[in-house]
Image: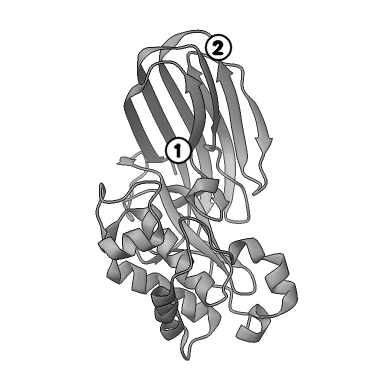
């Protein structure tokens, strides 16, 4: 099954006093691969700016722009149309011995190392080893993702973008970012290269053509077990035609939709709106 999907991601700021300088970068351009084709994408700002694009270290498309005229509001809209398909079955060719080999560790070391939001943790590493016991690497990925799904409750407001996987585990609650971070911690603890993927999810599995749903940015994980493949621990489902992927990295900090610095009044409001429409 394949879908054609339109995503409109709007972010708005207002400031208590005029901002006189603003430097920003956004990651709102979906990536293309064997599962997803980008038909069209544009990023627009109000006030209008002259933007340029580049590809970052993780091969994500970044739109960068700056503003030097005083402004009290800033709105950024990323609009995309993509064609998506099911990702296929998990890759199962790698053995545990293969994952321990020097060439795999050297090639994927960045997806095996700890970060500030995906730290090492002795107790969770023990949980990961139990989930690995008697399983193949691909099955261990499913065990980990399903364990996270069972042990975290989806609840916004309990964590922030700076929260770590351990914070979410201790709270037993979090959002998709936390489900992904905790899955990454467990997978890396048992030597499976794993990366964070940001994107969107059409929330209705039976979505009708022209149906628009409200949503938010979504996140899931990809694991390397002989090849990269994705799984969504928040919903305990394989990545498929309802998922639109935008960026990947070690954790959320590598793929944040918007980063920037500015000089001026404090930001007094932040409005984020995501609309996802199935076109075909």
Near-viewer residue (220 or 41)? 220
Residue indicated by mark 1? 6
The residue furthest top is 69
Q: Which residue is drawn at 58% across and 79% down?
A: 92
Near-viewer residue (94 or 126)? 126
Q: Is residue 213 left or right of residue 10?
A: left
User: What label sits on residue 259 in the rendered view?
Assistant: none
Question: What SS does tag 2 mark?
Answer: loop
Q: Which residue is drawn at 52% across and 58% down?
A: 115
Mark 2 neighbour class, 10 Å CA radius: few under 14, some 14 to 19, many 20 or more: few
Q: Quadrant of the C terminus?
A: top left
Mark 1 neighbour class, 10 Å CA radius: few under 14, some 14 to 19, many 20 or more: many
Instruction: Answer above or below: position of 147 versus 28.
Output: below
Q: Which residue is drawn at 43% across and 19% down?
A: 74
**Nearer mark to the viewer, of 2 and 1:** 2
Near-viewer residue (18 or 229)? 18
- Residue 237 placement (x, y as % from top left): 39, 65
Instruction: Answer above or below: position of 266 versus 238.
Output: above
- Residue 120 placement (x, y as % from top left): 48, 68
The earlier-in-sequence mark between 2 and 1 is 1
Residue indicated by mark 2? 68
Instruction: Answer above or below: position of 9 versus 141.
Output: above
- Residue 224 placement (x, y as % from top left): 60, 69
Q: Distance between the residues labelled 2 and 1?
A: 32 Å
The residue furthest front is 122
Is residue 229 in sight in this rendering? yes
Q: Which residue is drawn at 68% across and 72% down?
A: 105
Question: What SS does tag 1 mark?
Answer: strand
């Amino acid at each position: 099954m394949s879908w054609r999907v339109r995503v409109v991601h709007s972010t708005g700021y207002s400031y208590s006093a005029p901002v006189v300088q603003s430097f920003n970068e956004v990651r709102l351009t979906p990536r293309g691969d064997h599962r997803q084709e980008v038909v069209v994408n544009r990023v627009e700002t109000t006030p209008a700016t002259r933007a340029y694009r580049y590809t970052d270290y993780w091969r994500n498309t970044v739109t960068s722009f700056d503003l030097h005229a005083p402004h009290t509001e800033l709105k950024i809209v990323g609009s995309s149309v993509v064609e998506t398909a099911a990702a296929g079955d998990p890759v199962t060719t790698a053995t545990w011995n293969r994952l321990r080999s020097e060439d795999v560790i050297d090639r994927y070391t960045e997806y095996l190392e700890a970060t500030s939001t995906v730290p090492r943790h002795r107790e969770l590493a023990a949980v990961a080893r139990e989930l690995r016991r008697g399983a193949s690497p691909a099955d261990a990925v499913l065990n980990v993702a399903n364990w996270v799904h069972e042990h975290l409750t989806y609840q916004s407001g309990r964590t922030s973008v700076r929260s770590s996987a351990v914070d979410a585990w201790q709270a037993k609650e979090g959002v998709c970012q936390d489900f992904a971070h905790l899955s990454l911690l467990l997978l890396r603890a048992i030597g499976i290269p794993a990366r964070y993927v940001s994107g969107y999810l059409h929330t209705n599995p039976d979505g009708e053509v022209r149906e628009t749903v409200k949503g938010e940015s979504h996140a899931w994980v990809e694991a390397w077990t002989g090849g990269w493949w994705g799984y969504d621990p928040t919903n305990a489902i394989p990545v498929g035609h309802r998922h639109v992927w935008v960026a990947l990295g070690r954790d959320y900090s590598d793929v944040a939709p918007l980063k920037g610095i500015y000089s001026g009044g404090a930001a007094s409001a932040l409005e984020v709106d995501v609309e996802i429409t199935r076109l075909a």
